[in-house]
Amino acid sequence: MNEPRFLPVVPTDHPPACAASLVHDFTPELISVGAHQLCPGCGEPMAIRAVAEAVAELGLTRSCIAVFGIGCSTAFSNNLDIEVVQALHGRAPSVATGITRMRPDVTALTVQGDGDMVNEGLQEVLHAAARGERITCFMLNNGVFGETGGQMTATTVLGQRTKNSPEGRDARHHGHPIRLADLVATLDGAVYVARGAVDTAVNVQRTKRMVLKALQAQKRGFALVEVLTMCPTGWAVDTTRSARYMADHHARIHSMGVLKDTGGGRSR
Amino acid sequence: MSAGTLVIDTEACKGCELCVDACPPAVLVMTTDRVNARGYRHPELLPGCIACKACTAICPDFVFQVYRYHPSEEDTR
Amino acid sequence: MSAPRFMAGSDALAAAMVAAGCRFFAGYPMTPFTGVLEAMAQRLPGAGGVCMNAESELEAIGMCWGAAAIGARAATGSTGQGLALMQESLAEMTSARLPLVVLNMARGQGDYFQTTRGGGHGDYRLPVLAPVDVSEAVTHVSLAFGWAEAWRTPVMLFGDYYLAHTHRSVSIPAPEEPVTPAWAVDGRSGGTGRARLISPLGTVKQRDGQGAQAGYDLAVHYRACADRTRAMLDGIAPRIEAETGGDTAVLVVAYGSPAAYVRAAVRELRAEGLPVGYARPVTLVPFPYGALARLARGCRAVAVYENNSGQAVDDVRLAVDGQVPVEFIGGLSMDPSGFGIAPDLDVTHLKERIMQLVGRVAAR
């Protein structure tokens, strides 16, 4: 039984027959395969797309090596037409260090989750930042271990219920969340530190600008962009409510903005 | 009445509906009577697309192509 | 080879690494490995290389992972505890197929199992060289880099306090110019549709055969790793040094620094007319099982000396496979000299132990 339709549906199974310009293709140039097995409503593909687009726009396509940590996003490294070195959990900043120290002409970036960067590999990212390594680290922060099914990470906000904090994160027992970008911004070797989000189309665009700035700042020193991403599966929140949930909970603690920009002052 | 239009790869869609909330003119609606091969509902386009690319910015599964009509065509739509 | 120079073992190892084309080194101070790190920090910059003071062993080997991925000859090292921290990376580097030379300046032969079996996960082996002295060690450095590149695996060089801290007159092999291997990443394949991927997980770029089927086949990956390990173990000829005669009744086996003392004791005993022989596995992985079995054939006993409570003795037993009785004549023996080399390693003392065994064998 068909429901009555009040508006005519525009055919969208083929390009328009009349004169029109393609202003956005399915996938950007450096994502060679769009299909992936990340969950419905996952925020990571948008963040990784921003990185892939920025690499292409800055003309770094033929000189870029992306170092992926371990997490849901690792699988996405197989979709990219960018050279990739997969690292162990938490170790991506060291691997990127080894790459750029031997090949300063290469743009090395890392893609890591919050479990990877803040739990397992906190000392790596802090020391890489303090050394002022010419690398850019991207941290996809969804506040849970997504790949293992939604457990508490160091960035999980107080009160957040996860599989191993079933009554909510309690500061007395689980401690307080770590605001990584804020921590990195205090280190002298870091030249650009920002926190973006992919909960709205506008924030995706803002995050993209941060990614561009970071990759340019990398010539001067260490750059970090933390990107808040939705994990409806790990949060046990409906996909239609996950963006709002993130804004109301996660982004309250991990607030968006440019935390440090030694090149262009504090600006958004 | 439409400045642009979309091609939607409905088979790539996982039905998260992020595009529906993101669409400024609110011309994306989810199917209610049809699903794709994997069982997900997917968006459909109503007249009024402004080719703003918000849907594609927020889409985790790269299901949208966005077209902007040339000005001569726009008036007739 | 350079003219012989009187050098600390650590410095000689560093000079040999630079000569072998090593251009990246990362480490964390830990006795008795520290001297190697210091020497590399002095030598590498002048050779166009980079030496990094990592904030932990975890990061040291992570940096090497990156340097190896872009095709640089890379090395790190530590002692037992630090190597314990590196085990995850060592195991995963075998599956990522990344070459690396690891200087294991152990605090004693108690690390034999750690070195030859490793504490990492998965179905892997690392080739292990156990030099008897600095002169041999500098030749092993070049060998280790060659194996690391040929088999795309970490290779371990098993030394100790004695190797690192004693001064010897040593010739450094002639410099080699490293060639960047074809598989290395450099960023340049990006955007070509054939971007390279280095993966310890066995994943492949989706365009390479698995299409939209994300994920990967672990069974395929693990079998490929196991096949490569087998090919490597078959492809590297095990090395052994032996001094025996047709009359050898007791074969004494030792490895690493203590083997020099055992060799001296056996030589003296042979000069005195005792029917003893000496064998030293030079490669611990692959272990010279076949060669040792042949040497043991016709002997009445095989004795194993090592400065621990008995680890390599297991490999010797595997080698002789029950054909000859194997007796352990070693034991943990430490003194406060700082060398980790023990009072046991007195040639007179070793001779006594060997003669006691010869006596027991004769009485059987």
Image (cartoon, rainbow, N blue to C red):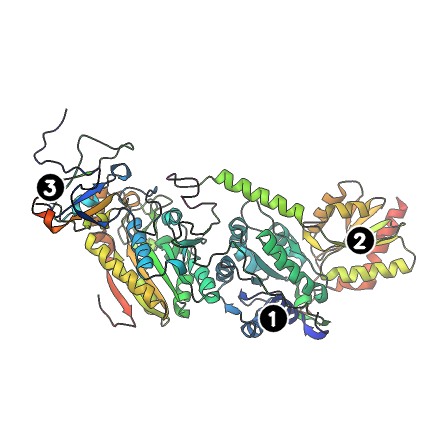
Q: Which secondary structure lies at badge 3?
A: loop
| Marking on residue A224 | none
Residue under the image location 40 percent in, 52 percent down: C192
| Residue that carries the numbered disc 2 in the rendered image | C252
Q: As drawn, is A201 to the left or to the right of A142?
A: left
Cα–Cα span, label 2 and label 3: 90 Å
Looking at the image, is C202 positioned above or below residue A91?
above
Q: Nearer the viewer's eye, disc 1 or disc 3?
A: 3
Q: Which secondary structure lies at badge 1?
A: helix
Q: Nearer the viewer, residue C204 or C78?
A: C204
Q: Amino acid at mark 1?
A: Gly
Q: Nearer the viewer, residue A173 or C221?
A: C221
Residue occupying the far right of the picture: C273
Residue under the image location 57 percent in, 69 percent down: C37
Q: Which secondary structure lies at badge 2?
A: strand
Q: Nearer the viewer's eye, disc 1 or disc 2?
A: 1
Q: Residues within 10 Å of mark 2 (few under 14, many from 20)?
A: many
* Dominant secondary structure, magenta: loop
Please say whether residue A172 is visible from this viewpoint.
no
Q: Residues within 10 Å of mark 1 (few under 14, many from 20)?
A: many
Q: Nearer the viewer, residue A164 or A135?
A: A135
Q: As drawn, is A151 to the left or to the right of C288?
A: left
